Amino acid sequence: MKRVCFTLQVRPDRLDEYRRRHAAVWPDMLRALRDAGWHDYSLFLRDDGLLVGYLLTEDLAAAQAAMDTTEVNARWQAEMAGFFVGLDDGRPDLGFRVLDEVFNLDDQLEAIDDS
């Protein structure tokens, strides 16, 4: 599994509503994410609107493509688009910025334990 971390920017005036929407995500959306290969998926939100997402997946592009085939994702993305700043195409699921992983404790411990 690959670790993926990404960022988006939530509009500061919509933070409370964004939190409310994510407190009870639609069950069919939750199942679609799981079935598409999104595992251990979490979102973290800073008070200025910086959103950091983290997930495990075998293949991010394949997981995104699988979600793109679902009707629930189309509805969810349409409802969520207005929460974000700076999305060229308006789709948060395609507009996030993936971060490069520069350190992982378990990987480095495993490397020294194997030597």
Image: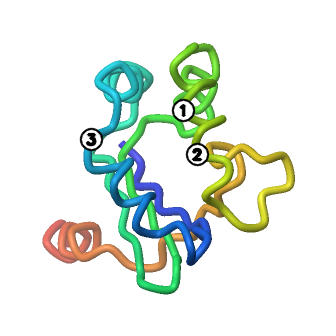
Q: Secondary structure at mark 2?
A: helix
Depth order, front residue of 64/25: 25
- Residue 51 percent coordinates (x, y): 49, 69
Which residue sits at x=54%, y=63%?
6
Numbered circle sitting on residue 76: 1
Q: Amino acid at mark 3?
A: Ala
Numbered circle sitting on residue 80: 2
Q: Which of the image's four quarters has the N terminus?
A: top left
Would you say the residues marked 3 and 1 are in contact, meaning their CB atoms lie under 8 Å apart? no
Image height of 13 relative to 36, above or below: below
Left or right of 90 on screen, residue 66 = left
Marks 3/1: CA distance? Answer: 13 Å
Q: Amino acid at mark 2?
A: Met
Depth order, front residue of 2/29: 29
Which residue sits at x=54%, y=32%?
76
- The residue at which mark 3 appears reads as 24
Check the image and name the residue furthest to the left: 113
